[in-house]
């Protein structure tokens, strides 16, 4: 299995809703990432988990809450979002062997629309 | 200050018309430079990793090269299915947690 799987692919939610995005990989990668990408912009880093511990939080609003239950799963809990949070949310995992970075595998993303 | 700059922002090519995309970077030490292809509404698809100046990698119609300051993605005889946004990202040697710095991408359109 060489994929990062994200669900759902599309999500529409109201500003008072609570929802979660899920990400799963079975490649044994120990670093996982959440990125946010607005239209025609590059991905922006939100969170980094390394060995299931939150290592980077890029001052993301508290209405986004990440969780890493185990080394294969990554969740992003959403609550009281704003319309400007509408974006493509990308999960990625990183393969690093013996100090060499072989690449980052991205999921296909969740297209989030906040209404 | 952008650490990764890609040019051009957009490129239109006729099928079969070869060209190159540029990615220039400014980091204290390069651990790796990555090229991705991204289709609209999809996640980035990994193409290449380059580690040191002089390195080259090829895949079908694509060839990536690296110097100390920039990387080029050469597209030979492109086809319409090569149309996508091509993203360049760098990993700084000082980053222990693998933060990627992305360029803004080059939107490539290949018309028949």
Image: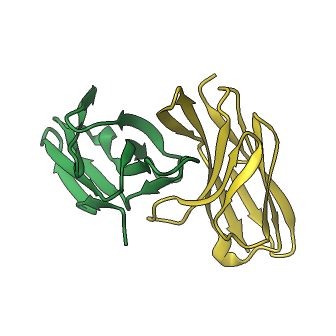
Chain colours: A yellow, B green
Q: Nearer the viewer, residue B13 or B56?
A: B56
Q: Nearer the viewer, residue B84 or B96?
A: B96
Q: Residue A106 placed where, x, y %?
A: 56, 42
Q: Residue at x 64, y 76 (%)?
A: A84
* A101 left or right, relative to B19: right
Name, please, the residue furthest toward the top: A1
Q: Residue A66 placed where, x, y %?
A: 78, 56
Query: Is residue B6 shown above or below A53?
Result: below
Q: Quadrant of the N terminus of chain A?
A: top right
Q: Residue at x 36, y 55 (%)?
A: B28
Query: Is residue B102 shown above or below A62?
Result: above
* B2 left or right, relative to A16: left
Residue B12 is drawn in which quadrant? bottom left
Q: Residue at x 46, y 60 (%)?
A: A42
Q: Residue B111 placed where, x, y %?
A: 23, 48
Q: Quadrant of the C terminus of chain A?
A: bottom right
Q: Residue A98 placed where, x, y %?
A: 53, 26
- Number of numbered discs visible in the structure rendering: 0
Q: Nearer the viewer, residue A50 or B63?
A: A50
Query: Is residue B56 shown above or below A47?
Result: above
* B88 left or right, relative to A55: left
Residue A82 is drawn in which quadrant? bottom right
Q: Residue at x 65, y 26 (%)?
A: A27
* B10 left or right, relative to B92: left
């Amino acid at each position: 299995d060489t994929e990062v799987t994200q669900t759902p692919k599309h999500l529409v939610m109201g500003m008072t809703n609570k929802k979660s995005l899920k990400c799963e990989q079975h490649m044994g990668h120990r670093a996982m990432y959440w990125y946010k990408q607005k239209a025609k912009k590059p991905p922006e880093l939100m969170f980094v988990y390394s060995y299931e511990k939150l290592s980077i939080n890029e001052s993301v609003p508290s209405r986004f809450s990440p969780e890493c239950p185990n080394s294969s799963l990554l969740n992003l809990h959403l609550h009281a979002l704003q319309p400007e949070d509408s974006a493509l949310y990308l999960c990625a995992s990183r393969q690093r062997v013996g100090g060499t970075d072989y690449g980052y595998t991205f999921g296909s993303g969740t297209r989030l629309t906040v209404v | 200050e952008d650490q990764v700059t890609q040019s051009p922002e957009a490129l239109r090519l006729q099928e079969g018309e070869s060209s190159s995309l540029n990615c220039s970077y400014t980091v204290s030490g390069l651990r790796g430079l990555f090229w991705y292809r991204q289709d609209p509404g999809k996640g980035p698809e990994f193409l290449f990793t380059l580690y040191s100046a002089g390195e080259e990698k090829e895949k079908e119609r694509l060839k990536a090269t690296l110097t100390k300051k920039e990387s080029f993605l050469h597209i030979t005889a492109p086809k319409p299915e090569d149309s996508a946004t091509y993203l360049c990202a760098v990993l700084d040697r000082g980053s222990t947690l693998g933060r990627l710095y992305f360029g803004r991408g080059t939107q490539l359109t290949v018309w028949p």
